[in-house]
Amino acid sequence: MYSTASHVSSFDRSLAAVHMRSQEQVEMLRALLLSFVYFAFTDIGHWTSYDGVLVSLGLSVILPSWRPYLMLLVLSVHDAPGQADPSIYGCVVGIAAMMIITSLITRGGSIAETAEDRTFRRIAATGFCLAVFGTISSYFHQRWGLHQQLDDRPFWIVGGLTAFMMLAGLVCHRAIVADPWSSPRLRVICVLALAHILVVTLLQVKLGPQFGASPAGLHAIATRMELLEGGERGVARLTGPFLSPNTLAILPAFYMILYLRACRSRIISGAFIVSFLSVGLLVAGLGAARSMFAFYLLAGGALIWTRSPQRVIVLGVCCLPFLLLIDIPFDDILMSMRLRNLESIQSLGTRGLYWQATLSNLKLSDWMLGFGVSHWPVFFQFYTGSMASDPHNWIMSMGGSYGLPGLLFYSTVGWLLLKRSLSGPKKLRAISTCLFLLFIARDLANTQYLVNNHPMSCLYWMAFGSAFIGLSDVDSEEETLSEHLT
């Protein structure tokens, strides 16, 4: 009797496993079809420059369980013939609004919060309050004539969008965690988003930097010399489907981090590390993004170290002689990254001017309380003669906009990521390390998007949530799938 029952139980488990694999393949096929439909309307733009917007919003209405994945597809295209910049704002706000309303109606669904979920939710709530603080600060600075806020960037819109993007990232993260089919769906979506970015960018190498842009995007590219002829760098900077070489360099990192999150294995495969380095260094090189080039090298080394510290040492010893023998064009690389002849902070170009102006003119009161979310353009117009929405440095950005509260918030985020990068499963340590290098190191010389009104902030928070998936989430995934099937 016992052996018969055991045999039946084993047969049932095998049958359930076959059924689960079959259903996963169906979900992967659905993700494939969904991506192709979206990219077709976005890249062709047959009817209007907003075909991709209408399709993504329409699909979000009829396919509610696919909304976070549609959000990822939308965030992978910032400008195209069927999704002209800045229509991405409409896509992100529309999809996120549907998700927030659904979450309020269902009271967050049936997902049980873990300790990691609560930690991440509290961080997002703190960031939300920080955005509200910045908006209120802008109001008083404008009303009392302390620091003028730019009329073309109404502070209430900037602050409202900043808070909303954090909330959007949070609800997308929670929806993915609650989805029993998140692993196959997320993997396919991330791979296809990366493939689309690479195809558009490589075609720009052959057909010119204006390939794949909307009519408005063509005009924007034509007005920027560095995108056409290279300017001081001596090499044209490609933008992919983003109109920004820096965005081209950083976005693939988030999709690769999300892909790593979706993998069920707790270890990091060698194939993933090779892909991470290959894709990352390629897009950073094509976009001539020096900070991201360094990031991919550091993050790749961290991934290898997390997987096997011994291999890092062996690879270093074996590769060093070859590096000494190879004739690497360091001068050309330094020129393209604009790192040659660094005699002063001004040698870094416009970014150096912004840093010098900020360090020389921000008062102690500004560092303590901030001067609002829309004063930076006015500040740089006065001190440098050109407008910029951000000083391209997270310390200056958070200090100037939000004062000491902003600096404490960003530093706390960095500290939490650092702590999570030092303990736990290898995969989660690797994710936390990559995010730490992005938020703290990369953002030292770039616009920070953790607290920002741009839709990229939503993607930042979706990836950020990947560092707060505990062991319970990983271990219970198979049980959730089995319960879903039965």
Image: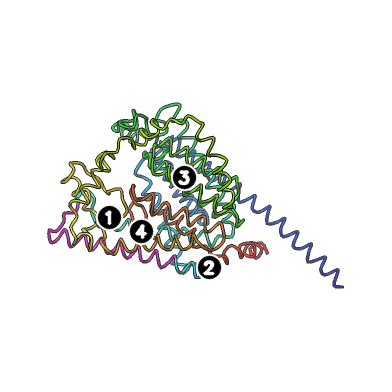
The mark nearer the N terminus, 3 or 2, is: 2
Picture residue at 53% right of the left edge, 59% below the top: 428
Q: In the picture provided, is 24 more to the left or to the right than 340?
A: right
Q: Residue furthest right?
A: 1
Would residue 390 be counted in the magenta stretch? no
Could you say whether the residue bearing mark 1 is in a helix, strand or loop? helix
The mark nearer the N terminus, 4 or 2, is: 2
Label 4 to label 1: alpha-carbon separation: 10 Å
Label 4 to label 2: alpha-carbon separation: 22 Å
Label 3 to label 2: alpha-carbon separation: 35 Å
Q: Position of residue 108 (x, y in %)?
A: 47, 67
Residue marked by disc 2: 111
The dot on residue 230 is none
Residue marked by disc 1: 157
Residue 217 position by quadrant: top left
Viewer-closest of 265 and 117: 265
Residue marked by disc 4: 164
Residue marked by disc 3: 296
- Count residues near mark 4 (Cα–Cα under 10 Å), then give few for <14, some for 14-19, many for 20+: many
| Kind of residue indicated by mark 3 | Tyr
| Kind of residue indicated by mark 1 | Ile
